[in-house]
Amino acid sequence: MAAKEKKYKLRSIEDYIRRDLVFMNNPVLVTGLGLAPVIMGAVTLKNALILSVGVAVLCTPVRFLGNLLVGYLPQRLRAMVYSLMAAGMFIPCLMLEHRLFGYNINNFVGLYLPLLAVDAIIISRTEIPGRETVWDSIRNGVVTSLGFALVICIVGSVREILFYGSIYGHELSWLPARLPIAGVACGGFIIVGLLAALWQWLISVIKRSIYRGRSV
Amino acid sequence: MPSSSKKIPRQLHPSFRKTRDQLIIMLPVCGMAFYLYGLRPLIMIAMAAVLALLCDLMVAGMRGRQMDFSDLSSLSFALIFTLMLPASCSYGVLIFGVLMTVLVGKHAFGGWGVSPFHPSAYGFAATVICFSDQVFRYPRPFSDLPLGYAPEVDLFDGPAATLKLGGRPDIDLGSLVFGDFNGPMGATFCLILVASLVFMVAHGEITWQVPVSFLGVSALWAFIFPRIQSGRLESVAYELMAGTMLFAAVFIAAEPSTSPSTPRAKLVYGALLGIASMLFSHYGVFQQGVCFAVLLISPLSSWLSRKLPVRQERVSDGGEVS
C-alpha cells in the first residue's frame, strides 16, 4: 500500500511538472512562444500590462472555441480559423484596454497589440492534433496567459528600470546609471535570453531537489 | 616498470597559436596608442585584458570546467574592441563594452569558433548604440589625458563625422598616414596597420582575399560615389583611412573563425562586407558602419563556403590536370 501511495505521489509530481505552464513550461521562456511582443513591445511595465491583458482576453476563448472545432477543421485550416476568431475577439479586447489604460494605447504598444491575433501564443493550440477536455482547454488558456503575463511584466519592469530609470512612470532617483541598450530590440533579446538562462537554471535546481527527495 | 612521473603533454587550445601571434602583432598598435595619447590607453588595455580573463574564469566556473589558459581569444577580442575606442572613453563604457564582447559576443554563442560574428564587432556595436556621444568624440593626439574615470578634456569630432555631413576633413595625407588626427586610439596610424596586414598575410595568420576584396570594393565605392567634392582619389583616401575601415580589414574582417573557408567565398564575403560598410557609413545613423556591416554579413560566411566550394581539379583522359 505504501509503495502504491508512493507511486501515485511520484506520478502526480511528474504530472505537475508537465502541466505547469506558468513556471516549469513557461510559454515564453521555455517553449519560445510570444517572443515578438515581449522583445519589441515590452519596453515599460505599462506596455507589458497592456499586452498581458490582450493575451489574457484572446488566449482562453480562442483555445476553448478552437478545441470545440478540432473535429470539424482540417489541420491546414486551423491556424487561419483561430486567427480569425482572435481577430473577432480583438474588438472587445480593445474596448477593455481603452477602459483600463486610456485611448492612447497605440502610442505605447503600436502594432504589437493587434498582432497578438496572429501570434503563436494565441494559435499554438493548432499544434495539438487531438481534442482536450473543456476544463483542460480553459485551464490551459488561463495558465498560458498567466505564464506570459509573468514573463512580460518582469521583462518590461527590468527594461523600464534600465532604460528610463523609472517603474510604471515613477522615477527611481537612486539609480546610479542607465543602460540605453535596454530600450532597443537588441537589448530586449539580450535581456530575454539572460532571463531564459536564469529560468532554466532555476528549473534544473527545482527538478534536482524534487528527484533527490524521491530517491531518499 | 614504466615511470609514473612521466607527464602527459597538455593539449593547447586550437586558437592559441593564431591569437598569440595576433596579440604580438597588436603590440606596435598599442605602442602607437601610447605614443599618441600617453598612459591612459595602456591602462584601458590592461583593464580590458584583466576583465576578459575574469569573464573567462567566471564562465568556466559556471560550466563546471577548468579554465583553459591557452585560450587567448577573449584577450584578443577585448583588445581589438578597446583599440577602436577613443582614448578619452570612460572606464565604465570600456567595462560595459568588454563585458558585451566577451560574455555576450563570445560565450553566449558558444565560444571561440562557434560565434556567427566577430565578438569585438558586436561589443563595439552595442557600445555605439548605448554611448555614441562618448565613442565618436576624440581627444587631440599628444594631448595630456588625465588617468581618472572620465577625463574632462576637449573632445572633437573625427573625420568620419565630417564626411557624414558631406564636408572635407581638414587633414593632409601625411597626418592621415601617420595617425596625427582625432580618431580611435588604435585605428589612426595607418602605416602600422598596413604593415600589420602585410605581415599577417605573409605569415599565414590570415589570407589576402577578405581584406583585399573588402578594401578594394570600399575604395571602388568611394571612387564612384564620393561624399566630398574635392576629388575622387581624396575621397578614397579619407573613406579608407579616416575611420575604422583599415583596422577592421586587418583585425576583424579576416578573422578565420568567422570568415568563409574557401577562397572564392572569401572574395565574395569581403566584397559584400565592403558594400555593406559603405552603405552603413553613407546612409546609417552612425558615422562609422563597419561593425554593423560585420554583424550583418558574417552569418552568411558558412552559406558562402557551401555555395562557393574549392574548385575540383579535373583530370583529362591523357592524365593532364586542368
Image: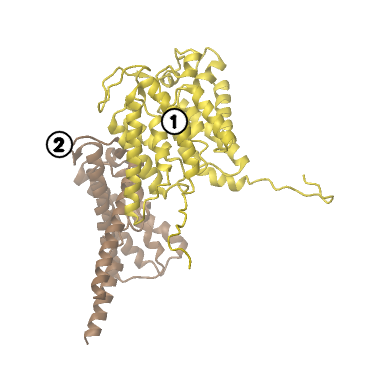
User: Which residue matches tag 2?
Assistant: A174
Residue lying at the far front in this picture: please name it: B1
Q: Amino acid at mark 1?
A: Leu
SS type, badge 1: helix
Which residue is more in the foreground, A138 or B96?
Answer: B96
Residue at coordinates 36% horizontally, 63% vertically from top-left? A66
Left or right of residue B186: residue A114: left
Assess disc 2: are there few (<14), some (14-19) or many (≥20) residues with their C-alpha within 10 Å of its C-alpha.
Answer: few
Residue B141 appears at what percent x and percent y? 38, 17
Residue A16 appears at what percent x and percent y? 26, 69
SS type, badge 2: loop
From the image, state the color of chain A: brown
Left or right of residue B2: residue A2: left
Q: Is residue B34 above or below residue B55?
A: above
Q: Is residue B282 above or below residue B81?
A: above
Which residue is more in the foreground, B227 or B28?
Answer: B28
Q: Amino acid at mark 2?
A: Trp
Q: Which image quarter holds the C terminus of chain B?
A: top right
Residue A152 appears at what percent x and percent y? 27, 50
User: Which residue matches tag 1?
Assistant: B27
Which residue is more in the foreground, B82 or B231?
Answer: B82
From the image, state the color of chain B: yellow
Q: Is residue A141 visible?
A: no
Residue at coordinates 40% horizontally, 34% vertically from top-left? B81
Residue A178's disc number: none
Q: Are marks 1 and 2 in contact (CB under 8 Å)?
A: no
Read off the chain for label 2. A
Residue lying at the far right in this picture: please name it: B318
Specify the quadrant of the image occupied by residue B203: top right
